[in-house]
Image (tube, helix red, strand yellow):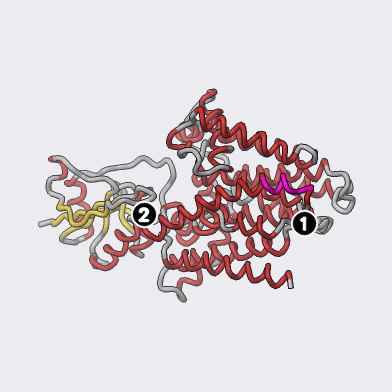
Amino acid sequence: MRWRIEHLLVIIFTGLLGVFKFNFHELWKDEWQAWFDAKDMGLGEMLSFLNYEGHPALWYLYLKLFVPLQSFFEQDELIIQWAHLLLVLVSFYLLFVKLKTPLPIKILYAAGYFLFFEYGLINRAYVFVVLFAFLITYLIQSQKGKKNLLPISLFLICQTEVYGLIIAGALMVYLLYDTEMDLITSTKVQARNLVALAVGVLVFVITVFPRGNEDDFTRAYNQTGFSVESILKSFQGLQSNTFLIGITKDTAAQGYTTFGLVSSVVVFALIFLLFHKRRPILYSWLSGFLVFLFFASFIYTGGVRQWGMLLILFFCLVSLMHLKWERRCIYPLLIVAVFGVFSLVHGVRGLHYDLTGSFTNAKKTGLFLKEKVPIEVPIVGINKFENTPVIGYADRKFYSLPSGEPFSYFRWLEKVYIPSVQELKLFAQFKGVGGLVIVSPRKLEGQAFAELQLWQSFDQANFKQENYYVYSLPVR
């Protein structure tokens, strides 16, 4: 009967997530950007573009498989959501059916903020990290890694996100230290795993290593500099802000506090106590955490979404402990459960906001333009980066100046160009139309833009703080 309960939970959680996805979730710029990269670029062009994205290829290649389905769906949004939900389904299956963790703990984490909201609701490549992290953990604990699936999984998780690469390295540390696992720790098998991991790292680096515009990339990836402050901020983000989420304010926005640092030390101590008797797990955890800390401190600070990847590694290592509902496991399970409760409470808050509030104003703006602006009237987007989600919902490309070319995706680090009214008029004349529509994420005010007529403002309170202002410019 047990397997039926677990399979039923997979269906229930995937179904609930689907309800939220298709009825309440509004896609934001990063979700649309990956889709436009896959849809509007050739394969070679897309792969050569990923150094600007800062993400490896797997998610983009996966989305490209779904591009032909456009003829069957009225909205691209549905394709993106279905493609992502399929991966969530597999992740939930691995979690509930395959991983060896007490069922209440699985339910607690599956319903929590990170698995359900950040990696389940939001359509991004992080779900691939979750999927392969769970798969690798299952292969390790079931000792089925002697076959090719483990090295293949180690390679593929390196093509998900940089955090997938770090998790792969940490789990490899576990494999190297756990000498009791005879079936998957033979020299030949370990060599195969190490080669797969090394090749995965190499392909990752080749894909995303910054090429061109070195000064811009340097500024983008080293915003905080090498300082004690950046280390403390990252430490608090990776500990208190992740495992006790909600107990402190957002570290990425507010910085670190004394309370936040103290609570982070408590988290670190609790996890150390949880793992210290299992040396392979402890070494895996410490190696993973230190690389996470280094990356967040000196390369890219990130935020809750990125820091939550450390919680995925934590859950995988907890699964490798094979905890059971026994007296000797009470304290370890209590520690794991406390972290899960904080995630659950914060997840309920996030879902409540998704139900009652607005995630972004991009959807309202895009649907307004789709309904009100004839296809022959050009729409000029000010700031490609901010306009990407509006383009997705408007279901049409915008134009950018000074090039005058249509666009859907943006180039990260590209400078924002604000055209003058005269340039806009010349563009309208070139297109042979009597007027333009202009979409800007900021108000275009002052004498220089006096001829623009504000048509509609979309600046209601929203989670992503994405506001849009639609202007018209009649050309006589």
What is the magenta range?
A: 328-334
Closer to the camera in the image, 18 or 457 = 18
- Asked if the stretch drawn in magenta spans residue 312, the answer is no
Q: Quadrant of the C terminus?
A: bottom left
- Asked if the stretch drawn in magenta spans residue 330, the answer is yes
The image position of residue 189, as x and y in percent, is 85, 50
The image position of residue 373, as x and y in percent, is 24, 65
Q: 73 left or right of 125? A: left
Residue 83 lies in quadrant: bottom right
Residue farthest to the bottom, as pictured: 72
> Badge 2 local density, few (<14 within 10 Å), some, or many (20+)?
many
The image position of residue 47, as x and y in percent, is 55, 52
Q: Is residue 429 visible?
A: no
- Judged from the image, the secondary structure of the residue bearing numbered disc 2 is loop
Q: Is residue 473 above or below residue 229?
A: below
Circle nearer the N terminus (2, 1)? 1
What residue is shown with label 2? Answer: 360
The disc label shown at residue 139, or none = 1
Closer to the camera in the image, 291 or 115 = 115
> Marks 2/1: CA distance?
40 Å
